[in-house]
Image (cartoon, coloured by chain):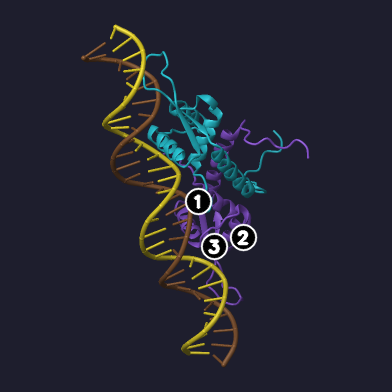
Chain colours: A cyan, B purple, C yellow, D brown
DNA sequence: CCAATTAATTCTACAATGTAGTATTAATAT
DNA sequence: ATATTAATACTACATTGTAGAATTAATTGG
């Protein structure tokens, strides 16, 4: 079977998880994404993607303990699997290769 | 309207066009992509994507002249529009921001 | 000039990913 | 127990990815 690309949103979600390390769960992932990419991410979009990535084996998850805070459901923590990391690398490399030598905007040479 | 991401394949196609400069048409784009990303790209996948990108205003096209070669239909040349370049930049920046500080593989420090 | 050949694009159909909104669940506090 | 809160799950539809077959348009040889 030919390796497929990751979708772009999928990539972003996985990168957010890597960044959050052991604090990567739905709400925190969503916040980081919204902040990092400067646009809204709907709750549904995120959870759907998390599920799909886990089903494909690119993410793993573990149920969090209940915490002594006001209330609310337990968190489900995510981590990027080895397979997921490989996929990220492949996508990154493919894009980098293609960007090679392309200059879209001229940077100002001096202020 | 919120800006959407480019799909990853869409990005790749646009980058290939930029690279090919004034020789970007279906067949050459496909060859460059196959070579650059190391996997097959079906004819249909490519042309469908080209059409959609043009319809969205991210690409422009122009009909090529018939050329004195064995035979075959005239080429349709593509170029990335200003809007297309902006979209590429946005996607690139978003991904770069997220990759910031993430180290997946340790590079060998010495051989 | 017409049939064969070639180079290229278009068409059709379905799968995977993107996206949003609403509903549900599970925990805590009163 | 009931209200409140934090979080996840569900449902549905739009967009993008993907493949293969069909079609078109050009050239050349006879």
The answer to which of D9 and B37 lies nearer the viewer is: D9
For label 3, count other residues whose C-alpha is less than 10 Å away and answer few (under 14), some (14-19) or many (20+): some
Q: Chain of mark 3?
A: B
x 38%, y 35%: residue: A44
Residue D10 image point, x, y percent = 31, 36
Q: Chain of mark 2?
A: B
Which of the numbered marks, if any, corresponds to residue B58? Answer: 1
x 56%, y 43%: residue: A87
Helix, strand or loop under label 2: helix
How far apart are the alpha carbons under marks 2 and 3? 12 Å
Helix, strand or loop under label 3: helix
Pointer 3 residue: B26
Task: Report whether B35 appears left or right of B3.
Answer: right
Which of the numbered marks, if any, corresponds to residue B22? Answer: 2
Task: Report whether C30 appears left or right of A90.
Answer: left
x 39%, y 32%: residue: A43
């Amino acid at each position: 079977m030919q390796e497929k690309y990751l979708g772009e949103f999928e990539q972003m979600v996985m990168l957010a998880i890597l960044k959050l390390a052991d604090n990567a769960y739905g709400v925190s992932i969503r916040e980081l994404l919204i902040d990092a990419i400067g646009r809204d991410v709907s709750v549904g979009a995120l959870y759907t993607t998390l599920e799909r990535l886990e089903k494909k084996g690119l993410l793993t998850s573990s149920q969090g303990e209940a915490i002594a805070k006001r209330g609310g459901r337990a968190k489900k923590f995510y981590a990027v699997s080895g397979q997921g990391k490989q996929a990220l690398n492949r996508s990154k490399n493919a894009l980098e290769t293609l960007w090679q030598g392309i200059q879209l905007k001229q940077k100002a040479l001096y202020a």
